[in-house]
Image: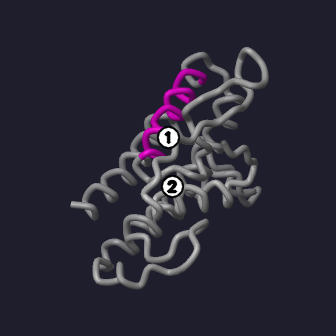
């Protein structure tokens, strides 16, 4: 049993377990509605694959929609910015995992040069990724130009942006 707060270390333990053919079960202990020390199977967003991040983002979007429906503007704006920040991280993971097939991955030691034979980068990949990253950055926690006064995207727009990532991921993996 290993307890850690270090995500990098967690990823190394998972990598080494996989290399050794040893099954590893991961759990998270954190804070929930009932207080601290709540066990969950859900790992931090930073450790998730692109497809699992999309699932988390869909849950995030549902929370945004709930607060939007209740007319809670400040909370809707805060959650939307957080969602777009996570969406940007999901695009980054998609580049590592999907586009570059895990050749170079954060939190993993080494470069998997043998996987280069699976890497194909089309101009359309660049265009889709650039558009997704640009849009995510526009609405994430970055401080926009004060003259821009960008309105908070509607929850449906956030959903479409998540769909955009998932569509790209599925098409590349196909």
Residue at image location 49% in from the left, 60% down from the top: 91
Image x and y of residue 57, in percent: 50, 40
Which quadrant, please, contains the N terminus? top right
Residue at image location 62% in from the left, 19% down from the top: 71
For label 1, the crowd category at 10 Å Cα-Cα, with few meaning under 14, some 14 to 19 and many 20 or more, is: many
Residue at image location 65% in from the left, 43% down from the top: 82
**Residue with the mark numbered 1:** 57
Q: Which residues are magenta?
A: 52-67
Q: CA distance from mark 1 to mark 2?
A: 9 Å
Figure check: 90 above or below 63: below
Figure check: 79 above or below 33: below
Dots 1, 2 in contact, CB < 8 A = yes
Which one is nearer the viewer's eye here, 59 or 44? 44
Residue 75 counted in the magenta span: no
Residue 65 counted in the magenta span: yes
Image x and y of residue 2, in percent: 69, 46
Q: Is residue 163 left or right of residue 149?
A: left
Which one is nearer the viewer's eye here, 77 or 23? 23
Figure check: 93 above or below 24: below
């Amino acid at each position: 049993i290993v307890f850690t707060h270090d995500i990098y270390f967690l990823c190394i333990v998972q990598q080494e377990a996989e290399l050794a053919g040893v099954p590893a079960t991961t759990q998270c202990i954190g804070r929930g509605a009932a207080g601290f020390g709540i066990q969950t199977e859900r790992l931090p967003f930073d450790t998730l694959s692109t497809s699992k991040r999309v699932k988390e983002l869909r849950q995030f979007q549902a929370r945004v929609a709930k607060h939007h429906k209740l007319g809670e503007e400040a909370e809707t704006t805060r959650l939307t910015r957080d969602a777009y920040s996570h969406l940007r991280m999901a695009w980054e993971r998609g580049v590592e995992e999907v586009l570059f097939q895990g050749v170079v991955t954060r939190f993993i030691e080494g470069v998997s040069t043998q996987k280069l034979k699976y890497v194909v980068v089309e101009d359309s990949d660049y265009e889709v990724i650039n558009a997704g990253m640009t849009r995510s950055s526009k609405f994430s926690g970055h401080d926009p130009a004060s003259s821009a006064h960008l309105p908070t995207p509607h929850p449906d727009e956030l959903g479409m942006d998540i769909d955009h990532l998932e569509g790209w991921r599925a098409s590349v993996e196909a």
